[in-house]
Amino acid sequence: TRDMQVAAVHALRGLAREPVPQEVLQAYELERLSFGPDYILPKPVDPRLIHHVAPAVARAAVEGGVARTGYPGHYPAFEEPGV
């Protein structure tokens, strides 16, 4: 749904503005990386993605009434990054 897409975008936006994990820097052989023209979306290998984007989309699905089940209990408590 549109709300689920927006939730994913907000989660990605928040992560892009947070400090980049060392393991991502190592994967790309970089010393530093921060939000700007060369970094507007988190890198695909960023381990934070699964912990921020999936819960955001799941929550939007539940709140939008399109989820077939409730918010998954094994997902972390939802927190929007950068807020």
Image (spheres, rainbow, N blue to C red):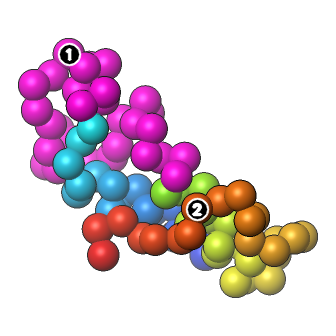
Q: 78 left or right of 82?
A: right
Residue 38, how many percent across, how many down? 17, 38
Residue 18, how many percent across, how many down? 23, 55
Q: Amino acid at mark 2?
A: Pro
Q: Return the disc, 2 or 1, that comes first in the chain's sequence.
A: 1
43 above or below 50? above
Question: For the N terminus, which image quadrant?
Answer: bottom right
Q: Amino acid at mark 1?
A: Glu
Identify the residue at horizontal 31%, vertical 27% (top origin).
23
Highlighted range, magenta? 22-51
Q: Main secondary structure of the magenta part?
A: loop
Checking the image for residue 29, the label placed there is: 1
Q: 43 left or right of 55?
A: left
Q: CA distance from mark 2 to mark 1?
A: 30 Å
The single residue placed furthest to the right in the displayed view is 68
Question: For the C terminus, which image quadrant?
Answer: bottom left
